[in-house]
Image (spheres, rainbow, N blue to C red):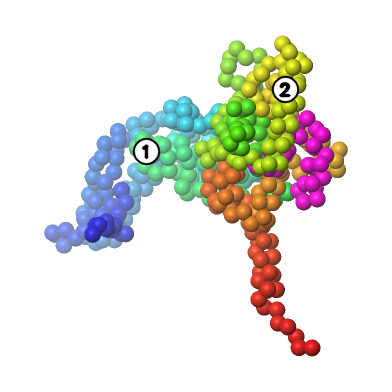
Amino acid sequence: MEDIKKTNKHKRSNGEGSVYKNKTGGYTGAISYKDETGKRKRKTFDCKTKKEVLAKMAEFKNQNYGKHYISSKQNITVKEWLDIWFNEYSINSIKLSTRVTYESYMKNHINPAIGNIKLVDLRGDIVQSFYNEKMRNGNLRREGGMKPKTIKNIHNMLHKAFEQAVKNDILIKNPLDAVVLSQVEKKEVKVLTVEEQRRLLKAVSSERLGIAVFIALATGMRIGEITGLQNSDIDLDKKKISVKYSLNRLKSYNPDAENKTELVLGSAKTKYSIRRLDISKELMEKIIEYKKIVESEKEFFGAEYSDRGFFICNEIGSPIEPRYYQKWFKEFLKRVGIEGVGFHSLRHTFSTRALEAKVSMKTVSEILGHSSISITMDLYSHVLEDQAREDMQVISTKFLTVDKDE
């Protein structure tokens, strides 16, 4: 029979210390700690009463642990540590788009406010005040505060950075553990009605760029994933679309580049975003139709045509960046009289229609490329509530209806 490992629920954490009765009849308290060089040491306290020992231990911990810092790098600032963490630990494990976002957070928000504070002096209440101020006046584009979701993103980045400092024995504990974040309000999911969806599909059928709308409503793919599709990602024989990449305009790190930004074909949003999706019969027809249009353009433009390998492209083969497509789509919606939605609404519309058709939440989550089913459930809980209400009525009508005697 396999042994079951037992754990002591009351085991003291490192640095908490212990108190015991000594041979003289008094009490001894002991604390293990690291000095400024990182060397582990032990400090003992002898007193007549247990209360006195605990007071001595608390005083020692306040004096030596209160600053969190245990490294010999006593003068390093928050900014200096973030630079080390970003360039040595983070940069090789994040996407380019995340890299750009982190740099923006550090340059525009973190460093100006708390960057010059020594890491030894950083406390949770300082970070809390920083977040609170951003809530009031953190919007750089207009008056007002920063959104709680953005503050949460900054917090997650900082927490990772300081957690690495804990692992490196630079910090005893993460000062951000004491911070309380504002609750992030759930965004209202914009979804096309069935009538709007039908009207949109009919109107967009005659548009050259309408293929992206069909793909979004048939698969729930994001705009960057759709515009980043390569011809090799679409397998008509197996009726599969491989979602591997995402096309985005990002900051250029090429010093010789003429523009500050560049189109980047990077990996999909997360490892869960890389997936293979089925091509329905209706979508297959639209893809074949679109391919014929592209082939005729290749023939017409001849040497001027540059095949870059992108499935969705302009008349001479160049990719169409998401920002341009979203602008086109917004103007197109105005022409057909549909308001209050954007291209991302097509992804939500696909998910809603799938759940309304009783497709399982797990399947929808996998199709969307979410990292967990809880994300999908949180986004589309309203659909489940509506569906549950309808199902309850069906049950009631079918099994609780009593025929009245005439």
Q: Which residues are magenta?
A: 192-219
Tell me, yes or no, whether the highlighted magenta stretch contains residue 194: yes
Q: Secondary structure at mark 1?
A: helix
Q: Is residue 347 above or below residue 398?
A: above
Q: Amino acid at mark 2?
A: Glu
Rendering coords of residue 222 (x, y %): 65, 38
Q: Which residue is mark 2?
A: 295
Q: Which residue is mark 1?
A: 167
Could you tell me which residue is drawn at 58 percent across and 16 percent down? 254
Rendering coords of residue 179 (x, y %): 51, 48
Q: Nearest the camera: 358 or 326?
A: 358
Residue 247 left/right relative to 70: right
- Determine if residue 69 is in view: no
Majority secondary structure in the magenta region: helix
Residue 51 left/right relative to 200: left
Could you tell me which residue is drawn at 79 percent across and 46 percent down? 198
Q: Nearest the camera: 396 or 372?
A: 396
